Amino acid sequence: MSKWEYCAVVGIGKLTRDLNPYYPAIWHFTAEGVQVIQIKGKEAAEVGRTIARLGEEGWEMVGCGTEGGDNSSHHVVYFKRPKS
């Protein structure tokens, strides 16, 4: 049986906005809970680099969605990779 690990890039604002009051983050889901790593810097560039880095580390993008209400919605991108 295959075993997987999962993570998500959460809190991605609308990339057309100049400022996002909340930093996006990587949420790494583990048996012990969630490990959160904030992504700081110019959001569009840093989120793009983070997603590319996750791909280089073997993470596969498997889904996306939004969280929050209409005015405060943020995008979420989900990833998985085989557990080593």
Image (cartoon, helix red, strand yellow):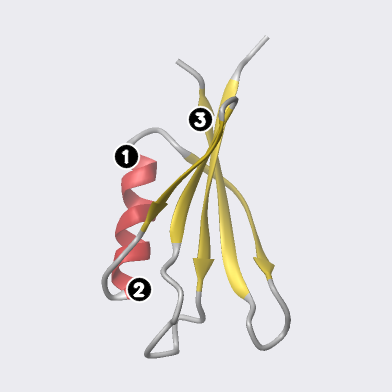
Dot 3, how many residues are within 10 Å of its Cα: few (below 14), some (14-19), or many (20+)? some
What residue is shown at x 30% (from left), y 66% (from top)? Answer: 40
Counting residues from the start of the chain, the first of labels 1 and 3 encountered is 1
Q: Is residue 9 left or right of residue 75?
A: left
Element at badge 1? helix
Q: Amino acid at mark 1?
A: Glu
Counting residues from the start of the chain, the first of labels 3 and 2 encountered is 2
State the residue in front, 79 or 11: 11
The relative height of residue 83 versus residue 71 in the rendered view (above or below) is above
Q: Are marks 3 and 2 in contact (CB under 8 Å)?
A: no
Mark 2 or mark 1, whichever is nearer to me: 2
Disc 3 marks which residue? 81
Q: Are marks 1 and 3 in contact (CB under 8 Å)?
A: no
- Outermost residue on the front side: it is 32
Q: Amino acid at mark 2?
A: Glu
Q: Amino acid at mark 3?
A: Arg
**Quadrant of the rendering where the N terminus is positioned:** top right
Disc 1 marks which residue? 56
Q: Residue 67 placed where, x, y %?
A: 68, 68
Q: Residue 48 placed where, x, y %?
A: 35, 63
What residue is shown at x 35% (from left), y 73% (from top)? Answer: 43
- Number of callouts: 3
Q: Residue 39 placed where, x, y %?
A: 35, 60
Mark 3 or mark 2, whichever is nearer to me: 2
Disc 2 marks which residue? 43
State the residue in front, 80 or 10: 10
